[in-house]
Amino acid sequence: MQQETSSDQALVERVQQGDKRAFDLLVVKYQYKVIGLISRYIHDQSESMDVAQESFIKAYRAINNFRGESAFYTWLYRIAVNTAKNHLVSRSRRPPESDVELDNEEVFSAHDALADIETPEASLNRDRLESAIHTAIKNLPEELRSALTLREFDGLSYEDISIVMDCPVGTVRSRIFRAREAIEKHISPMTNTGD
Amino acid sequence: MTKFNDHSSLSDSSVSAVFDGEANEQDIDTLLSKSDEEIHRHLEVYHLIQNTLKKESSTLGFLQSGLVDRVRSQIEKEDLTDNVVTLPLAEKTSDKVSWKLMFSSMAVAASVAFVVILSGNVLLSPDTTNENLTDSFELLEESADGSAIAEVVAQEESLPEDNMRLKHYLRQHAEQSALAVGQGMIPMARVVSYPVEE
């Protein structure tokens, strides 16, 4: 977690120096968390996207006020919650009495909130995609699969994984990347959408 | 850190490292030199893999959501960079502010001192007339702190025999102006040394 904070802080500093592309990276990194969080307040997909966009814009405007005293996502989280609540108030809808706690917000996914409006076709596509991912993981070499699952399931840092697997940190980094690359190649026919 | 001989591998694994929060400055430099589309595609697939492993499936509607493009286009549209003050070094900004403040303070002190001296020359001169006093009032009104001085001088117009009181007041004001901004004793010295017929 500390490593992730310093990684985000490095990107934030780039943004504060005027690098908009660094902000793009932060948006891509946290967009699903933000969308998932907002969707707990706003169930309409289109509105959720609009509020998520507004949240990131607010974060960009206020980026120079971020001093790194908390994690970047913690700061972004509060902006997103406030933006969602304000949106509900402006629509004369009552926001929930209690906020989604930061520790539990990862439990709430965009899919869970929008399942009611998901079409059968979208649901089928999703199931197929998940199945393809599980198949790809199963077919990975042992060391790649272990590195990836230690990272994704257990949330271990690269350094911790290197201790568990008794290999250098660079090797851990390479194995995780190669595992993702193999899965990405396997599911690419299903994720390429026409323009 | 392990060095990668293949530059392509370094840049691609940099995306993976950023996703995991394990990126260093070199990774960020490498990523920012690559095309956005490629980076974003990788990151979105990594999100999909992560959500699947954690049994938090994402809808395909959010894959390639285009949120990054929407945010970026809005930022560029509103030209928010003009409102985002870049702060490469906090010390530089504070230095600029303090210099500006110092120069502005010096300008105020100099103008006040000049007006005080000028008004002293005019008011304490034996040939002081109402017309000269009017000119003095105009000069005082133009000074940064002219309002207070002009009021006092206007009151003194009706009391020509109180030139000594005016001299005393002007001297005090010049002293305080000089000391307030630390601009030295020159204005005060001039007023102090002004001869007055008593």
Image (spheres, coloured by chain):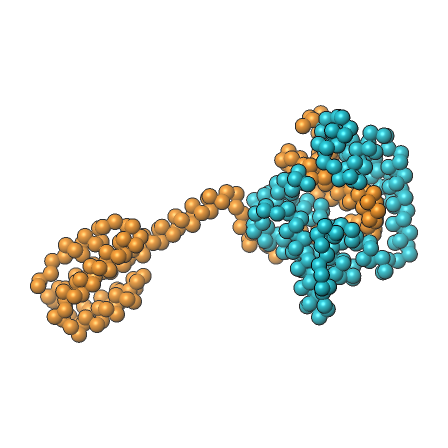
Chain colours: A cyan, B orange
Task: Give the farthest residue toward the left.
Answer: B198
Could you say where residue A63 lies in the image, as x and y percent from the top left? 59, 50
What residue is rendered at 72% in x and 41% in y? B19
Could you say where residue B149 lies in the image, as x and y percent from the top left? 25, 65
Nearest to the observer: residue B142 or residue B97: B97
Residue B191 seen in this snapshot: yes
Task: Give the farthest residue toward the bottom.
Answer: B158
Residue B6 seen in this snapshot: no
Q: How many marks?
A: 0
What residue is rendered at 36% in x and 50% in y? B102
Does residue A190 appear to the left or right of B93 in the view shown?
right
Does residue A88 appear to the left or right of B157 in the view shown?
right
Place residue A88 in its image quadrant: bottom right
What residue is rendered at 22% in x and 53% in y? B187
Could you say where residue B17 lies in the image, as x and y percent from the top left? 71, 36
Could you say where residue A122 lies in the image, as x and y percent from the top left? 88, 54
Q: Split into 4 quadrants, where in the image is the N terminus of chain A? A: top right
Vertical relation: A95 (above or below) B74: below
What residue is rendered at 57% in x and 47% in y? A67
